[in-house]
Amino acid sequence: MSNASSTKTTMTSDNQSATLLDGKALAKQIEQELRTRVDTLKEKTGRTPSLATILVGDDPASATYVRMKGNACKRVGMDSIRVEMPSTTTTEQLKAKIDELNNNPDVHGILLQHPVPDHVDERACFEQIDLAKDVDGVTCLGFGRMAMQQSAYGSCTPQGIMHLLDYYNIELAGLEAVVVGRSAILGKPMAMMLLNANCTVTMCHSKTQDLAAHIKRADIVVGAVGVPELIKAEWIKKGAVVVDAGFHPTDNGGVGDIEMTGVADIASAYTPVPGGVGPMTINTLIRQTVEAAEKAAGL
Ligand code: NAP
C-alpha cells in the first residue's frame, strides 16, 4: 500500500488532490500484524483466539456478513464458532446461548449479528454479552466506558473509522464534525469518539432541519444513515474530510450514503465506497478479538 502514514492531512482550502482513505489496504496490512500476534499467542499459551458469531434467522445479508467475519478469522489463523439459530428463537433462548458462550473459556469474543428478528429483544441480548467478550462494542457498559475514555472495545464501525483517520494522520482536534445518523452501533459511538478526539460534534438524524446547512460548515462529515447518496456532494465544504459508512449495491458496484461524484475535487480526504469503511469494520472486530484473547491469557 502507499505510504499514506507520512501524509499530514489538515484542513486546507486549496487542496490539490484529496487523500484516499484506503480501508481495504490498511485492513490487509493490519491482518498481517494480527497473524503474527495470533502465532505468538499460540506459541506462548497453546491457545487460539476464537470468535463466536451468532446468526438468528435466515436473512441472506446477515448470513453473508457472518461468513465474511468467519473468513477474516481464518485469514489471521483464528478459530471461529458459528452459531445458527432459527428465526423462531426467543429472547430467553438467545440469552441462554450467549451465557453458554460467556462461560466457554475457548471463546474470546462474541458477535450477535444485527438485526435479530423483531420479536427478540435485541438490546437485552446485547446486554447479556460479558464485557470482556464484547468485542463488537454493543453493550451499554462498553459504550459508557468508551465514552468515559476507560478501557473497552468500541463499536467496530466507528472504531475502525477512527483507526483509519489516525493511520492517515488526520488532525481531528478542533474540527467541526457532523455525524449523520444516531444509531447505537454507529452514529452515537462515532460522535462520542470524535468528541473524545476533541472535535466539536453535531449529530444529525431524521428530524434534523436543514441537513445541508449542517454539512456545509462541517470540517469532517460521517455518513451513517442508510439512505443512498442522501448527503449531496455540493454540500461538502472545501477541504473537508468525508467518511461514508454506507454501502448500497448498484449495477455499477455500489454507492454510499454520500454522493461521491466530484468529492475528490472538494475534500481533503475521503473514504472510497466500497473499500473504505467496510473492511475496517471487520478488521476491528478481529483485532479486538485478538486483544481479548491476549488479555484472557494474561499477555
Ligand atoms: P440505522 O440504525 O438505520 O440508523 C440510521 C440513522 O440515520 C438513524 O439515526 C436515522 O435517524 C438517520 N436517518 C435516516 N434518514 C435520515 C435522513 N433523511 N436525514 C438524516 N438522518 C436520517 O442504520 P445504521 O445501522 O446506523 O447504518 C447506517 C449506514 O451505515 C447504513 O448505510 C449501513 O449499511 C451502514 N453500515 C455500514 C457498516 C460497515 O461495516 N461499513 C456497518 C454498519 C452500518 P433517526 O434516529 O431519527 O431514525
Image: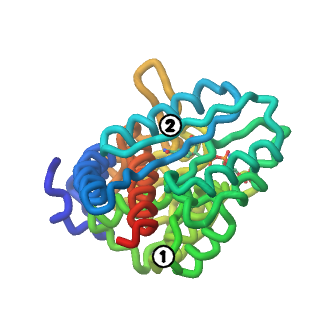
Question: Is the CB of the residue bearing disc 2 within 8 angstroms of ligand 1?
Answer: yes
Q: Which residue is mark 2?
A: 247
Residue 167 in sight here: yes
Characterize the local packing of mark 1: few (<14), some (14-19) or many (20 or more) Cα atoms within 10 angstroms: many
| Residue at (55% x, 36% y) in the render | 82
Of residues 292 and 41, the one drawn nearer to the viewer in this rendering: 41
Residue 272, by quadrant, is top left
50 on left or right of 123: left
Characterize the local packing of mark 2: few (<14), some (14-19) or many (20 or more) Cα atoms within 10 angstroms: many
Mark nearer the viewer, 1 or 2: 2
- Check disc 1 and report its element: helix, strand or loop: loop
Of residues 78 and 143, the one drawn nearer to the viewer in this rendering: 78
Of residues 10 and 57, the one drawn nearer to the viewer in this rendering: 57
Give residue 222's position: percent from left, percent from top: 50, 56
Q: Which residue is mark 1?
A: 199
User: Does the residue at mark 1 contact the one at mark 2 (Cβ under 8 Å)?
Assistant: no
